[in-house]
Amino acid sequence: MKHPLSNSFGKNRVTTEQREQLVRSVFKRVAPRYDLMNDLMSMGVHRLWKWRFCREVDKASGRDFVDLAGGTGDIASALQKSDRALLIIDPSEPMMQVARQRLGSHCHYIAGSAENIPLQDNSVDVLTISFGIRNVTDISASLQEITRVLKPGGHFYCLEFSTPQAWLRPFYDSWSRIVIPRLGALVAGHPDAYSYLIESIRQFPAQQEMQQLIENAGLQRVSYSNLSFGIACIHRAQKPPIE
Ligand SMILES: C[S@@+](CC[C@H](N)C(=O)[O-])C[C@H]1O[C@@H](n2cnc3c(N)ncnc32)[C@H](O)[C@@H]1O
């Protein structure tokens, strides 16, 4: 069964096809200011989360790394190593254009979506997705695709917003409802795009529910670690090795 996010855009009910188009138009519009907005909205904290995430991913062995929903290349640039083949997959050409300017030929780029990953079965050692999975139209189908392309024993890491601890929610809600759309209007010129991003965070499955969805997709050794009291969360899992 599809998660309710599949049929919502902000506070509106939409078809999955409409959602896909609307999400694509959000990232087309915000691409030039995306990195600056991330710094402002999170007061720079997203850099710490990404640093912690990449430090963990770095421990996984393998050569073929894929950063799904790789956007402007933050994660791929932190994971660059001479003995790794890095590939960014993202449906948004304008987002990947920023990544190309940063990373050039140190990385490969393919336009594609998480629901239909343009890679062969059992071909990826390590797959990361950072602040990407809440934008897909079908979380379960995307997780099944991730399982399909991972090699047996391959590793999956997901960094995403999650559900903060109860004491923090009033501050967090005020920040996201009042401050972020205004920043989106002032800096990026697109308050509606940032209202969508906030609403998608609010509707995204909480830690335990996401863990269950990952398990349902056939991955094992599933666990998570909260960041900043659950504002964000690292989920990790492994494809079962061949016995
Ligand atoms: C919030 S940005 C995250 C970019 C980058 N991973 C980061 O951490 O800064 C979300 C990205 O998800 C991409 N995206 C949207 N829908 C997607 C889908 N169905 N499959 C894969 N990526 C998608 C967008 O184009 C965008 O680049």
Image: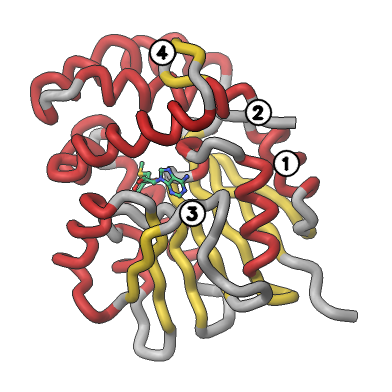
Q: Which residue is mark 2?
A: 3
Look at label 1 and name its amino acid.
Leu
Q: Nearer the viewer, mark 4 or mark 2?
A: 2
Q: Which mark is residue 173?
A: 4
For mark 2, give the secondary structure. Answer: loop
Camera-side residue of 81 and 195: 195
Q: Earlier in the sequence, mark 3 or mark 4?
A: 3
User: Residue placed at 54% from the left, 60% from the top?
Assistant: 117
Q: Quadrant of the N terminus?
A: top right
Q: Position of residue 46 (x, y in %)?
A: 33, 43
Question: Looking at the image, do the residues carrying marks 4 and 2 touch, with CB atoms under 8 Å apart?
Answer: no
Residue at figure coordinates x 80%, y 75% from the top left = 241
**Element marked by disc 4:** helix
**In the visual, does 25 lie left or right of 112?**
left
Indicate if the residue with disc 3 has its beta carbon within 8 Å of ligand 1.
yes
Q: What amino acid does circle 4 point to?
A: Asp
Q: Nearer the viewer, residue 121 or 183?
A: 121
- Between the C-alphas of marks 4 and 2, the distance is 22 Å
Q: Nearer the viewer, mark 4 or mark 1?
A: 1
Mark 1: which secondary structure? helix
Going by the numbered disc 2, the residue's amino acid type is His
Looking at the image, is mark 3 or mark 2 nearer the viewer? 2
Report the Cα–Cα distance between label 3 and label 4: 25 Å
Q: Residue 182 at what x, y percent from top left?
A: 18, 15
Q: Which residue is mark 3?
A: 129
The quadrant in which residue 187 appears is top left
Q: Position of residue 225 (x, y in %)?
A: 60, 46
Tell me the CA gap for discs 1 and 3: 15 Å
Q: Which residue is mark 1?
A: 213
Q: Secondary structure at mark 3?
A: strand
